């Protein structure tokens, strides 16, 4: 009788979040891979866009694997935004870069770049320089170099600081940990990243180009100039699935929902999302959006109770 009661109690108790797996298998190696990819980009001894584009694409791929982790080092000093500022509906990045291009480029330095608007920096800034929609106002070489160097420094700091920050997540509730006063707070923070990341994919990465049936806006897709509109959706879903699998590997319904959404995304033969001006292609993208939202709903319904947490505040809320 006691054995039956104990089994029932264990079955009804929240599962322990595998924070160690998130830190060791997802976050730290992901940020290290991004750091390595940006370092390889910085090693390209050329300002020729054709020479830089392959390494740029690799670095962008690496960021998609971890960009959903808007906590800790990524929150500090707007670091995540300085790596990828998107969307930019007012074109702030292009305006700031034009001023930099037409100003005294001899004064450009990594230190000076760190004081610039986040909209002019990072991957989005590099995309405008390497895939310009129209001729640039001046020779972009100095700005390309300093933008890459600034990005490399940010990537290096992020990778390094996930060492001590990961330790804070792992020691939640222990003496001396003033950031996470109990283990549930660390679990809630990671769970919130998952839900918020899925919301961002559905509402921004898919929702902005999807717009309306009568007036789709493929020009508003992320990474459209560099041909990454669909790739960013797929890679961000895969990154979020990695977080979910590490956080709660037994959550089979959530992982199945992820697999369905990823399969839909991989099945779309529309890298730029420019086919969505066709009604059938628009409907396929809307179906993907519904699948991503269903994945979020499933994660909240399954992981939340399993881990004993609810959604918390996230730095992306209200962006």
Image: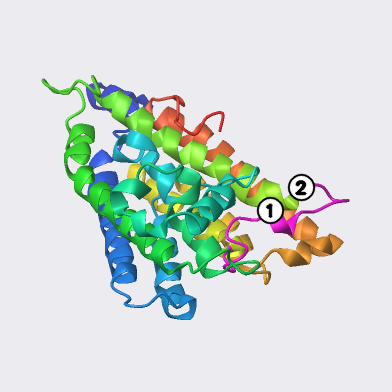
Q: Which residue is mark 2?
A: 211
For residue 296, what is the image quadrant? top right
Tell whether 286 sits left or right of 235: right
Magenta-drawn stretch contains 226: yes
Which residue shows up at 29% across the image and 48% down it? 111
Which residue shows up at 42% across the image and 44% down it? 116
Checking the image for residue 307, the label placed there is: none
For residue 68, what is the image quadrant? top left
- The magenta segment is 212-228
Specify whether residue 281 is in view: yes
Q: Could you classify mark 2 by the number of other residues whose Cα lies within 10 Å: few (under 14), some (14-19), or many (20 or more)? A: some
Establish if 274 lies above or below 241: below
Camera-nearest residue between 286 and 62: 62
**Quadrant that contains the N terminus:** top left
Tell whether 212 sits left or right of 16: right
* Residue 114 at x, y percent in the picture: 35, 45
Q: Which residue is mark 1?
A: 220
Specify whether residue 287 is in view: no
Magenta-drawn stretch contains 45: no
* Residue 307 at x, y percent in the picture: 37, 31
Whichever of labels 2 and 1 marks the residue nearer the N terminus, that label is 2
């Amino acid at each position: 009788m006691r054995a039956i009661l104990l089994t029932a109690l264990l079955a009804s108790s929240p599962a322990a979040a595998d924070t160690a797996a998130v830190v060791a298998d997802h976050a730290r190696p992901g940020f290290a891979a991004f750091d390595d990819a940006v370092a390889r980009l910085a090693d390209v001894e050329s300002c020729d866009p054709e020479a830089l584009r392959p390494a740029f694409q690799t670095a962008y791929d690496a960021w998609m694997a971890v960009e959903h982790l808007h906590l800790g080092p990524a929150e500090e000093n707007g670091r995540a935004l300085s790596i990828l500022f998107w969307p930019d509906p007012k074109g702030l990045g292009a305006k700031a870069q034009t001023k930099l291009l037409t100003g005294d480029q001899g004064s450009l330095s990594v230190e000076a770049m760190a004081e610039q608007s986040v909209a002019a920096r990072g991957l989005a800034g590099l995309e405008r320089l390497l895939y310009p929609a129209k001729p640039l106002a001046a020779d972009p070489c100095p700005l390309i170099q300093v933008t890459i160097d600034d990005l490399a420094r940010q990537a290096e700091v992020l990778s390094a600081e996930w060492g001590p920050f990961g330790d804070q997540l792992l020691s939640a509730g222990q003496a001396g940990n003033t950031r996470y006063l109990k283990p549930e707070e660390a679990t809630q923070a990671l769970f919130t990243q998952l839900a918020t990341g899925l919301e961002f994919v559905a509402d921004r990465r898919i929702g902005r180009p999807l717009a309306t049936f009568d007036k789709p806006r493929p020009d508003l897709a992320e990474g459209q100039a560099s041909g990454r509109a669909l790739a960013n959706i797929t890679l961000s879903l895969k990154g979020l699935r990695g977080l979910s699998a590490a956080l709660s590997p037994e959550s089979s319904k959530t992982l199945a929902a992820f697999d369905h959404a990823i399969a839909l995304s991989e099945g779309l033969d529309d890298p730029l999302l420019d086919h969505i001006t066709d009604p059938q292609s628009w409907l396929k993208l809307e179906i993907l959006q519904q699948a991503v939202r269903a994945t979020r709903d499933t994660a909240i319904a399954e992981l939340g109770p399993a881990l004993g947490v609810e959604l918390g505040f996230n730095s992306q809320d209200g962006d």
